[in-house]
Amino acid sequence: MTPSYSPNPPTILWWGRFDKNYSRNRILRQLLEELGYKLIDFIPKSSAFGGLQAAFTRFGHVDAVWVPCFRQNDYKAARRYASKHNIPLFFDPLISAWDKAVFERKKFAEDSSKSQKLLKWEQSLFSTADLVIADTTLHAEFYTSRLKSPATGTVVIPVGAEEELFTNQPFPPDNSPIEVLFYGSFINLQGPETIVKAAALMPDIKFTLLGEGPLKKSCQALAEGHPSIHFEDWIDYNTLPDRIGKAQILLGIFGDSPKASRVIPNKVYQSLACGRPTITRYSEAYPRELHEARQGLYFVPPASPEALADKISELVTDTSGLKQHAQAAHELYTKYFSLSALKQDLELAVKKILS
């Protein structure tokens, strides 16, 4: 791989109508630049006509094309461009459009014609990438088994957290009331209604649900008559670590969909990086050692308010021990998900294609 001091670093063209500030994109872009790659952004006015716009755009020398997360609609044009210029294409989808439509949103049955049409379309994307990047081993297995991603060309790079922002936060004073915090977009995958139902079982503990999304109104309706359950509007992203630091316990996701079982959400990485004990649904997407750690990160069955309430009760029984749990949380992040570890994974993955 060309070292970072090279006067002519390899250039990767990031192609698609993507969000530069989305956490996954920001982290991978930062790491690629640290590894010595030059990034050029191409955000077409139309996904369908991206190839035509690119034909009239001067990029200079390009060594590879990168299609970032959620940009399946940009893939075909990017693939044609990469093939025309005989350069490899990297694909970091993060999610499957077919999986989301059929199993999460349940828009149509798995064996329906619409489902099969969407599946074949997405298979035509995954199967033609030179390198497919997954965020967990379970997602990688799903990509290869269902979406025809190349087995030897599919790698795992966890999402991680933006460490310059999500730093180890001071723990609240010992006499502070216990607060359990969830933040998110109130979608089925996150299972926010499970959180509200668990909170209703624990009237002496303050629960805060922060954010906006389609299930927020139903959660607010469930919370009526329970003064210990609070809702906060979304806040500036840069202030999120400080808000995490005001709570003693953080919550991950609790949905029971197949997709929910395959992901490690941003909020788990971020909460651990901030040094907060975190509870989330059981998933084999996590390294096996984390299931045996018993401190810092805790797993409960999905869609079970009772199990979630029991785990919270277990943690708050010994409030003096919460600081130890917080330290353990940060240590788990550092060992398994730090950007230095991700950087090594990314370097190896890209080096397979660009050597």
Image (spheres, rainbow, N blue to C red):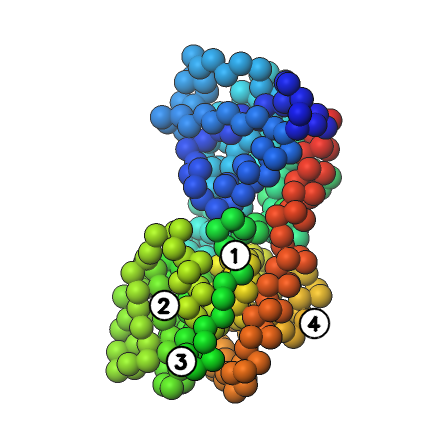
Q: Are marks 4 and 2 in contact (CB under 8 Å)?
A: no
Q: What residue type is disc 1 on?
A: Thr
Label 4: state its secondary structure. helix
Q: Residue at x 65, y 43 (%)?
A: 343
Q: Which residue is mark 2?
A: 209
Q: Which residue is mark 3?
A: 177
Q: Describe residue 210's horizontal placement relative to residue 55 as left or right.
A: left
Q: Are marks 3 and 4 in contact (CB under 8 Å)?
A: no
Q: Residues within 10 Å of mark 1 (few under 14, many from 20)?
A: some
Q: Which residue is mark 4?
A: 292
The answer for how far apart the CA atoms under marks 4 and 2 are is 28 Å
The answer for how far apart the CA atoms under marks 3 and 4 are is 29 Å
Q: What residue type is disc 2 on?
A: Leu
Closer to the N terminus: mark 2 or mark 1? 1
Q: Quarter of the image holding residue 322?
A: bottom right
Q: Which residue is mark 1?
A: 167
Label 3: state its secondary structure. loop
Q: Is residue 276 above or below residue 336?
A: below
Residue 185 position in % (x across, y down)? 38, 57
Closer to the N terminus: mark 2 or mark 3? 3
